[in-house]
Image: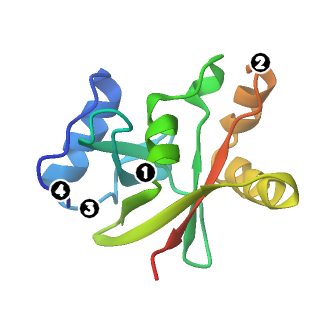
Amino acid sequence: MTQNAELSPTDWVREQTEKILEAGTTEGVTVLDRPIILVTTTGAKSGKKRYVPVMRVEHEGSYAMIASKGGMPEHPAWYHNVLAHPEVTVQDGTSTGSFVAREVQGEERQQWWERSVEAFPPYAEYQEKASRVIPVFVLEPKA
């Protein structure tokens, strides 16, 4: 997918990513039996490429990227990377493409949040325990 991208230091995230890279597909790699996609971001400070597996929330060719971090009080590290460098690569199954991320608010956020909770119900629990509004990014195909 992306040459020389770095794997996560978090064991379970690294293991998911390694499975995808070895198989050449995101198919069969799941969290709680739900499909995921692999997003490649660029580090906000380092400029290094980084792999981020996230839940698959797709609608009409665009994807959501939910900065839940399991409901922890802080945003995941990738949140700042995507804000600084919104151009990302998405692998869904064996297909890869270039996308541009934007954080959404208001009604658009609500629509994508509902799709996300439908795709991965634990997001609702994460929001309940989080002391922050969980950010939602929409990844749209790069023109």
Question: Residue beneath label 1, please?
Answer: 85
Calculate the distance from the C-alpha at mark 1 to the C-alpha at mark 3.
Answer: 24 Å
Q: Earlier in the sequence, mark 2 or mark 4?
A: 4
**In terms of image quadrants, where is residue 139?**
bottom right
Going by the picture, which residue comes out furthest to the bottom? Answer: 143
Q: Earlier in the sequence, mark 2 or mark 3?
A: 3
Residue 82, position as x, y percentages in the image = 47, 46
In the image, which disc is placed on residue 23?
4
Q: Secondary structure at mark 2?
A: loop
Callout 2 amino acid: Ser
Which residue appears at 52% of the width and 45% of the height? 83
Badge 1: few (under 14), some or many (20 or more) residues near its Cα, within 10 Å? some
Q: Secondary structure at mark 1?
A: loop
Measured along the vertical axis of the image, is residue 10 above or below residue 97? above
Question: Residue beneath label 3, please?
Answer: 25
Q: Nearer the viewer, residue 38 or 139?
A: 139
Q: Earlier in the sequence, mark 2 or mark 1?
A: 1
Which residue appears at 30% of the width and 39% of the height? 16
In the image, which disc is placed on residue 32?
none
Callout 4 amino acid: Ala
Q: Earlier in the sequence, mark 4 or mark 1?
A: 4
Q: Secondary structure at mark 3?
A: loop
Question: Residue beneath label 2, please?
Answer: 131
Dots 4 and 3: beta carbons under 8 Å? Answer: yes
Q: Earlier in the sequence, mark 1 or mark 3?
A: 3
Residue 22, position as x, y percentages in the image = 13, 51
Callout 3 amino acid: Thr
Residue 29, position as x, y percentages in the image = 35, 49
- The N terminus is located in which quarter? bottom left
